[in-house]
């Protein structure tokens, strides 16, 4: 069972080598996606059908929770850390996401 779970974990968390890389930056109350050609999108994402995509998640300010329920993807964007996330869409869809579960960088006493 451990081997089976490990195989699934590495398949989900390791994007393919030929994947298109899209940088997704979490900012206060928004996500900004930057495509390889220089196009920018705010709180939405357009990806090619049938092609592997690697989302590189970065946070500029606080902890952000990034999720795309249609692709069963949920990652945490942490300031100073880079989180890769791979997916391969099989049908045409416009992905809309929002900043959720934002956590303040410091806790108040």
Image (spheres, helix red, strand yellow):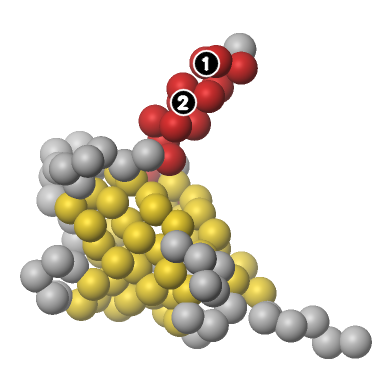
Q: Residue furthest top?
A: 1
Quadrant that contains the C terminus? bottom right
Number of marks drawn: 2
- Helix, strand or loop for disc 1: helix
Residue 13 in the figure: left or right of residue 91: right
Residue 21 rendering spot, x and y as whole percentages: 23, 57
- Helix, strand or loop for disc 2: helix
Name the disc covering residue 8, or none.
Answer: 2
Foreground of the two, 49 or 23: 23
Q: Is residue 64 visible?
A: no
Give me the C-alpha separation between circle 2 and circle 1: 6 Å
Name the disc covering residue 93, or none.
Answer: none
Q: Are marks 2 and 1 in contact (CB under 8 Å)?
A: yes
Residue 40 rendering spot, x and y as whole percentages: 20, 77
Query: Which residue carries the number 1 mark?
Result: 4
Quadrant that contains the N terminus? top right
Q: Is residue 23 visible?
A: yes
């Amino acid at each position: 069972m451990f081997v089976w779970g490990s195989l699934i974990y590495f398949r989900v968390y390791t994007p393919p080598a030929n994947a298109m890389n899209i940088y997704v930056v979490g900012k206060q109350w928004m996500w900004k996606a930057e495509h390889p050609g220089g196009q920018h999108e705010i709180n939405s994402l357009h990806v090619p059908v049938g092609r592997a995509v690697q989302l590189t998640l970065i946070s500029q300010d606080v902890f952000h929770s990034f999720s795309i329920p249609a692709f069963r993807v949920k990652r945490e964007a942490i300031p100073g850390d880079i989180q890769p996330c791979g997916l391969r869409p099989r049908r045409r869809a416009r992905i809309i996401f929002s900043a959720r579960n934002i956590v303040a960088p410091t806790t108040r006493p």
